[in-house]
Image: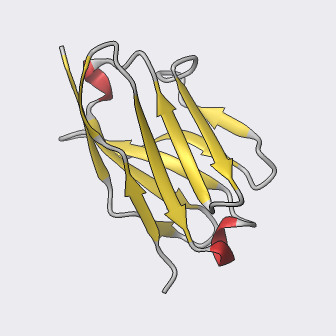
Amino acid sequence: QVQLVESGGGLVQAGGSLRLSCAASGSIFSSDAMGWYRQAPGKQRELVARITSRGRTNYADSVKGRFTISRDSAKNTVYLQMNSLKPEDTAVYYCNAETAGLWGQGTQVTVSS
């Protein structure tokens, strides 16, 4: 079964770091653009970062310079390294396989002030 499995969320103090992981089945990972989205309570889901199959990246303005998206083809995994976290980064973070239209189950990130 094709699926995305996220991990790495948690509770961290402002200024801290977390790394999210999203493991995907090889059939979709190798050719698909992958993205990380987030949804805070009462807000719409928004794109945080995206990486193409060739490694081209783009970021939301709010996370530029703090977050880094990367992918490991050998492990069929995409990562989101989050540094200098702020309370406004608190949200459920979702992994997305763009062309396949797949979403992970979400992982909670909470940043305390």
88, above or below 107, in the image: above
99, above or below 80, in the image: below
Q: Quadrant of residue 91?
A: top left
82, above or below 3, in the image: above
99, above or below 87, in the image: below
Task: Residue at 28%, 23% (x, y): give it.
Answer: 88
| Residue 52 drawn at (x, y percent) | 73, 51
Q: How many marks?
A: 0
Task: Residue at 65%, 73% (x, y): give it.
Answer: 26
| Residue 90 drawn at (x, y percent) | 26, 31
Task: Residue at 47%, 74% (x, y): give it.
Answer: 3
| Residue 107 drawn at (x, y percent) | 30, 50
| Quadrant in the picture for the C terminus | top left
Task: Residue at 64%, 68% (x, y): give it.
Answer: 99
| Residue 102 drawn at (x, y percent) | 49, 70
Q: 72 or 48: nearer the eye?
A: 72
Q: Residue furthest bottom?
A: 1
Is residue 77 found left or right of 54 in the rendered image? left
Q: Residue furthest right?
A: 54
Is residue 89 found left or right of 26 in the rendered image? left
Is residue 65 found left or right of 4 in the rendered image? right
Q: 26 or 94: nearer the eye?
A: 26
| Colour convention of the picture | secondary structure
